[in-house]
Amino acid sequence: MIKKNAKNIILVLFVVITGIFYIDSFMRSGVEEDFFTDIYLYLWNCNLNIVFTIVFLVVFQELCVMDSYKKIFTRFDRYIITRVGYVNFYKKEIKTIALKSLAYYYLLHTIMLLYCLIKYGYRTSPDIDLFKYQLFCGNPLLNIILFIILSSFGLIIFNCFIFSLSSFIKNMYLYRFTSLASFFVTILLSVIFSTLIQKIFGVTDLIKTIGQSLMITSLLQPGMAFMRYGFLNFSIAAIIFIILTIVTLSIAIKYRMKYDG
């Protein structure tokens, strides 16, 4: 237990250190905007900081999903699962994944925000326009709060989607990079979908935002694509990935019942 917790703490700290490195880099670049409104959200924009996004995806799959994945392919756990029933097993694991996602995600934000507050101080500059993020409203602090709350639920949805794929990927080392693979696959699909709807409805920020809702970053970084339409961006992505998760889980349950039966 101690060894496992130590590993998880190290993984969280690795993401924290990576994030802090980029935050400090942004501040040293001479940007004077309030970190709560600009610099901190800048960190979470994959268009501007893809390295941090990749680190986050890989680490959080390890933290939140891998333990549940291992149960499916461990002989003893599989025997217990067949006794309990796959529907009950998936319900229990989804709850566990949701709790882990919230706990680690809020811990990550708390540490990094406290670091910024202690080192750079707090100030709100509503008149700054250069990098100002219009995600949900005009209030800088409320933008941060809404971003963290929405993206935390987006992380739960995404991790549950990744878990729904677990029965179909039997290689554990390959499965560890499912989140990363999903990131690049959804970028490709989003480009195709976005191109199609832009030809039909024209090119506007609103249409671009809808077109990019297939990307997993719409769940994890809602509204970042064009710094607006955050609620719409998140809502469409959430509906898409919830449907995909339910369908995939239904197929997985039937597959596991046949495979283990």
Image: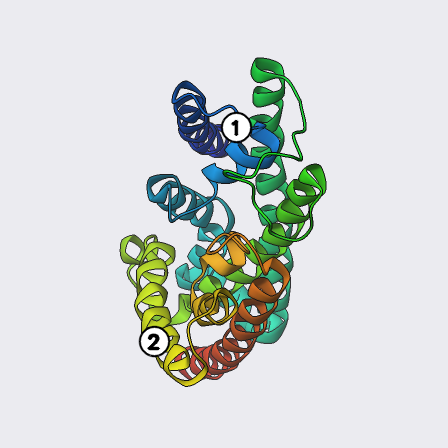
Label number found at residue 2: 1
**Compared with residue 161, is residue 36 higher up or lower down, i.e. above or below?**
above
In terms of sequence position, does the residue under pointer 1 or pointer 2 come before the other? 1
Examine the image and state in which quarter residue 208 appears.
bottom left
Residue at 50% x, 71% y: name it. 210
Examine the image and state in which quarter residue 107 appears.
top right
Residue at 44% x, 51% y: name it. 66
Q: What is the x, y in percent for residue 225?
A: 46, 56
**Compared with residue 181, is residue 146 higher up or lower down, i.e. above or below?**
above
| Residue 35 seen by the camera | yes
* Secondary element at image label 1: helix
* Secondary element at image label 2: helix
Residue at 46% x, 77% y: name it. 252
Task: Report, in whole angstroms, how far the alpha carbon at label 1 lies from the one at label 2.
Answer: 50 Å
Q: Amino acid at mark 1?
A: Ile
Query: Could you say which is closer to the camera, residue 79 or residue 99?
Result: 99
Q: Which residue is mark 2?
A: 195
Query: Could you say which is closer to the camera, residue 136 or residue 78?
Result: 136
Q: What is the x, y in percent for residue 31?
A: 46, 25
Q: Amino acid at mark 2?
A: Thr
